[in-house]
Image (cartoon, helix red, strand yellow):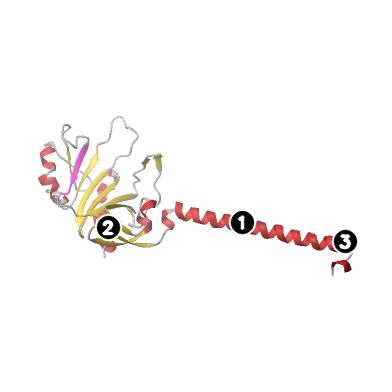
Amino acid sequence: MFKAHTPGTRIAYDGNMQQRTVIATIATVFALLLAGWGVYAWLDDPSSVNTTLDVQLGKVRLALPSAYIRNPEARRPGEFLEIELAASATDFRPAPRPRKLRPDLEDASTGTIYLNLREQEKSIDPAERPARLYVRFLETEQWTHPGGLIMRHFESSSPFGREDLYMAPPEGRVFAARCIRPQQPPDGLPNTCIAEMRLQGLDLRMRFSPELLSDWERITLGVRGLVHSLVR
């Protein structure tokens, strides 16, 4: 067949074939690059992961949207001793990735609440800790916080010497938070608060910015609602 074609026609035909081959190769490489970028973005952006995982914390089973899980390596079903979540303080949906202050330290963003969940332990109920544990370490003076909370300093010689206690009157059973006392001069590290509660067979520790203290009632209700929605 090819002998019937003129040399010019043969060259044009071969050129078209080479052009098509080059275009097909470029398209394949481009598709692979897009696919690779898509996988990378999926792994790199927790908010884009919408899988619901069957997670077990002791005897408690959770149906947990993987986007809440802070550590990417823990985004899998199975049993855990504890698991840490990150939720938006606005709507309690999965929080965006926190800003890195340095490789080993993340910013405790005002808009993010970090939640550590583990099976309930045989220890003092967090609701009773202010009256049964913390009171012996507190100074006598107290101040009223804008959120309606009472603030008291921990004694400097106590195990909580760098912290202040904020609690709902009269004894902090409804809400209590230990907050790092602002350093003077500032040390550049974020100030954080820790509040604990027990519900649904779980011990829950919340870590958040002191700027959210005035909104403690809404935050507490929102976190409780979130945990109730996860437990099965």
**Callout 1 amino acid:** Phe
Image disc number at residue 30: 1
| Total labels drawn | 3
Seen at 19% across and 37% down, the residue is 160
How far apart are labels 2 and 3 at the CA level? 77 Å
Which of these two is toward me, 68 or 210? 68
Q: Answer with the quarter of the image where residue 29 lies.
A: bottom right
* Above or below for 209 versus 3: above
Q: What stretch is highlighted in magenta?
A: 163-168
- Front position among marks 3 and 1: 3
Label 3, secondary structure: give it. Answer: helix
Packing grade of label 1 (10 A; few <14, some 14-19, many >=20) is: few
Label the magenta part by its dominant secondary structure: strand
Kindly identify the amino acid type of the residue bearing the numbered disc 3: Gly
- Name the front one of labels 2 and 1: 1
Q: Are marks 2 and 1 in contact (CB under 8 Å)?
A: no
| Residue type indicated by callout 2 | Gly
Query: Which of these two is toward me, 198 or 35?
Result: 35
Place of residue 111 in the rendered image (x, y in percent of width and height, measured from the top left)? 35, 49
Rendered image: mark on residue 222: 2
Task: State which quadrant residue 135 falls in.
Answer: top left
Q: Name the residue under label 3.
A: 8
